[in-house]
């Protein structure tokens, strides 16, 4: 049968050039394709000598080009050109439309439209690797999987892999403005050079698409959720079309953010009421226009009635009524509407933790089938640690998609090493107990509310024009980890970190072990020196750079850090039990019961749900005050250990990237000390307790830390 396949396939390609790589500045991300060690090269070279592409379709061509690039980089020039795969062995890329049915039938039901199978076979006694997919994009994903196996030193002589994504919509949300400023961006300007589009397509757009395809991301929202209606103008749609043309071969659809008031700003209407016939007609015509320009347009993302953005509540309409109006216009084109559940209002005196649940849960089952309600992992705002959002499991008749923040708005920007894989794993593994035990957030995301219904995950991108893409070498890991979790929400943070480390820093065991150890402890270090024991939102306001636990003068109460810590002579923490805001009642009874009791609530969430006396005895036997100080110091000490670990890798890592990480870790240690000292100085001024023995006082008095201002910190909104 496989000889029959060879007769069907006509495109025979060989490789002979080594990878034309960039300098080791981080540009190549995890796709470095560095030469394999001699022993490994000798072992794999026979099976990797040639490959066959099944067609000349653009996505298959992209897959073949990536394979050629990867193998050329890892193996170098290989002698022998124009040999047939059945004569010399090789790699075969095939889709089931070109595959004999009895060969393909085994995998058809399992791989779907985006999955793939990779198998080691023999043709005429020659070792052959078959990459099989139903659709071209699956073949592309299969190629990247095979290259990852080679980069990470995995055996390829007995491959039998079948894999497919568990979520349908896997998108990056770029908070990029049309002037190229990136809100909460710490890696330079926006990639999208709107002034030069559509006639100039920067080659970097292709590398962006390659990187996303390598981790299974299949969509990108090009514009900020704080939307500008101008992106929907005809001239800008032509620019969007140009980007879509670059991304299409890599399986990536483009999406845009829609400003709810666009019918007024662009259409000259007097209202944006979603029930007004003229408004509905305007949106239908606009969306029809978009699909005329971009036939495979993915859909729209909307932030409404949050932080000053217009929305249906301006007209006394519900979120469902606003979302359904847009969803109805998208439906004939099979477009998706992503509607953010991030809402809170200054005039609402309710605990901010409760507001999204209060507004959205009563609307369960009232959204159209092509609406995905986009819910952040926690109920506040991408904090270093939050309990899982209570909406997960509480809207069983509504498709919910996860929203993670890849860019580290609240975790030290680009200069603090904080691997977010552990945070996301924590959220995805959380058991909602809805409808029963074992109903993890991951399982809820993966399970369509109806057969064929949309599922998804979104990540707020950390990408910009910096040569290393993300502002730091280690922040690349968060982009990578997001793609892996979006493909499989049940993935493990440790395994993801290990793959990334091997591909990014070299497949040396000692290097990988050290890098993974640093990564796996990094986020907890940040939690400890910023917001230990369930404290939250203690950052300086506006830019969120550095500590500001004393801030209490902003006009909206929930903008002030004192709103969350509630530090007073009698104790610290936000009471969310029945005696307080009763936010715990939004969770399933099994969850609420555990977190309601001081005896069973985890220390990590203690002050999130309870106001606790300073002298309360913790599980360790220490007082809360002493435990708080010890956690601050533990965070600083963890950064010092990362510095020592990294110093030990100087001879194993290229000098340019090693030096940048060294310097960034020095910044992180200095700022961790700032966080520690400022926080202890403030809370000690209220607790009036001495520091535990062996823990030094802050370097300066409280007034010194209060006087620090950083008005030009990057990434602020405009």
Image (cartoon, grey):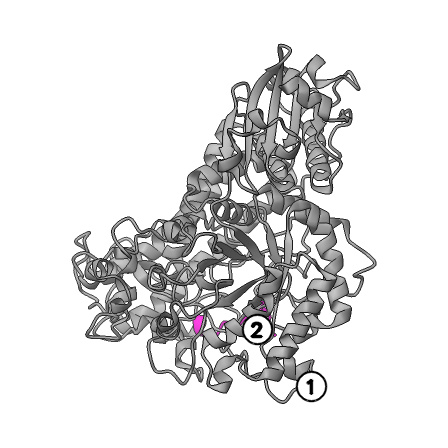
Q: Is residue 566 left or right of residue 166?
A: left
Of helix, strand and loop, which one carries label 2? loop
Of tags 2 and 1, which is closer to the observer?
Answer: 1
Residue 647 seen in this snapshot:
no
Give the position of the N terminus as an image quadrant: top right
Give the position of the C terminus as an image quadrant: bottom right
Neighbor class of circle 2 (other Cα within 10 Å; few <14, some 14-19, many 20+) is few
Q: 80 or 420: which is nearer to us?
A: 80
Number of numbered discs overlaid on the protein picture:
2
- Above or below, 621 against 290 in this view is above
Q: Is residue 211 left or right of residue 389?
A: right
Where residue 465 appears, as percent x and y from the top left, is: 69, 55
Taking the magenta stretch, the answer to whether it contains residue 401 is no
Mark 2 or mark 1: which comes first in sequence?
1
Where residue 125 appears, as percent x and y from the top left, is: 62, 10
Where residue 559 appears, as percent x and y from the top left, is: 43, 76
Q: 30 or 570: which is nearer to us?
A: 30
- What residue sits right under mark 2 in the picture? 711
- What residue sits right under mark 1 in the picture? 268
> Which residues are drawn in magenta?
704-718
Give the prevailing secondary structure in the magenta stretch.
loop
- Above or below, 485 against 342 in this view is above
Taking the magenta stretch, the answer to whether it contains residue 710 is yes
């Amino acid at each position: 049968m496989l000889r029959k396949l060879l007769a069907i396939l006509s495109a025979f390609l060989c490789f002979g050039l080594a990878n034309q790589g960039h300098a080791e500045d981080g540009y190549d991300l995890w796709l470095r394709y560095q030469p394999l060690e001699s022993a490994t090269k000798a072992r794999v070279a026979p099976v990797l000598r040639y490959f066959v592409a099944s067609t000349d379709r653009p996505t298959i061509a992209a897959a073949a080009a990536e394979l050629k690039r990867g193998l050329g980089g890892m193996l170098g020039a290989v002698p022998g050109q124009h040999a047939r795969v059945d004569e010399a062995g090789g790699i075969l890329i095939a889709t089931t439309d070109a595959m004999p049915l009895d060969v393909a039938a085994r995998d058809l039901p399992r791989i779907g439209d985006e999955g793939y199978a990779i198998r080691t076979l023999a043709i005429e006694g020659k070792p052959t690797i078959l990459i099989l997919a139903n659709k071209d994009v699956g073949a592309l994903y299969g190629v990247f999987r095979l290259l990852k196996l080679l980069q990470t030193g995995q055996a390829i002589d007995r491959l039998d892999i079948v894999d497919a994504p568990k979520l349908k919509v896997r998108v990056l949300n770029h908070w990029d403005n049309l002037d190229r400023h990136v809100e909460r961006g710490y890696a330079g300007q926006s990639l999208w050079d709107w002034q030069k589009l559509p006639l100039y397509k920067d080659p970097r757009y292709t590398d962006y698409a390659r990187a996303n395809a390598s981790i299974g991301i299949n969509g990108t929202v090009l514009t900020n959720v704080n939307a500008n209606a101008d992106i929907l103008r005809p001239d800008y749609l032509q620019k969007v079309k140009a980007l879509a043309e670059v991304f299409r071969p890599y399986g990536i659809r483009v999406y845009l953010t829609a400003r709810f008031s666009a019918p007024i700003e662009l259409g000259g209407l007097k209202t944006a009421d979603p029930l007004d016939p003229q408004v509905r007609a305007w949106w239908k015509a606009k969306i029809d226009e978009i699909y005329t320009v971009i036939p495979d347009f993915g859909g729209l993302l909307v932030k409404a009635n949050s932080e000053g953005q217009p929305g249906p509540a301006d007209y006394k309409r519900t979120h469902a009524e606003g979302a359904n109006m847009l969803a109805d216009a998208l439906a004939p084109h099979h477009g998706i509407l992503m509607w953010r559940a991030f809402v809170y209002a200054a005039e609402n005196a309710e605990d901010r933790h409760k507001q999204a649940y209060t507004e959205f849960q009563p609307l369960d089952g009232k959204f159209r089938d092509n609406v995905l309600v986009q819910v952040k992992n926690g109920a506040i705002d991408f904090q270093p640690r939050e309990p899982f959002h209570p909406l997960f499991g509480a809207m069983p008749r509504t498709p919910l998609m996860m929203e993670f923040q890849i860019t580290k708005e609240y975790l030290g920007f680009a200069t603090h090493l904080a691997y977010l894989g552990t945070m996301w794993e924590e959220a995805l593994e959380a058991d909602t107990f809805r409808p029963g035990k074992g109903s993890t957030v991951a399982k809820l995301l993966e399970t369509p509310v109806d057969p064929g219904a949309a599922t998804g995950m979104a990540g707020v991108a950390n990408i910009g024009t910096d040569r290393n893409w993300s502002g730091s070498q280690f922040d690349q890991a968060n982009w990578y980890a997001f793609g892996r979790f979006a493909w499989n929400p049940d993935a493990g943070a440790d395994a993801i970190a290990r793959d990334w480390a091997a591909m990014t820093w070299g497949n040396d065991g000692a290097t990988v072990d050290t890098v993974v150890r640093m990564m796996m402890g990094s986020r907890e270090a940040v939690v400890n020196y910023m917001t230990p024991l369930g404290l939250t939102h203690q950052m300086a306001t506006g830019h969120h750079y550095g500590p500001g636990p004393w801030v209490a003068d902003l006009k909206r109460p929930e903008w002030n850090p004192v709103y969350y810590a509630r530090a007073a002579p009698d104790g610290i923490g936000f009471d969310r039990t029945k005696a307080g805001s009763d936010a715990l009642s939004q969770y399933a009874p099994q969850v609420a019961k555990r977190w309601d009791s001081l005896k069973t609530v985890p220390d990590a969430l203690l002050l999130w749900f309870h106001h606790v006396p300073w002298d309360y005895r913790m599980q360790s036997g220490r007082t809360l005050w002493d435990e708080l100080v010890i956690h601050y110091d533990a965070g600083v000490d963890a950064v010092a250990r990362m510095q020592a670990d990294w110093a030990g890798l100087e001879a194993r890592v290229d000098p340019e990237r090693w030096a940048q990480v060294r310097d960034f870790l020095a910044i992180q240690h200095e700022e961790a000390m700032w966080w520690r000292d400022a926080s202890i100085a403030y809370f000690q001024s209220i607790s009036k307790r001495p520091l535990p023995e062996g823990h030094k006082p802050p370097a300066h008095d409280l007034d010194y830390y209060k006087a620090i201002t950083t008005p030009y910190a990057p990434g602020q909104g405009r």
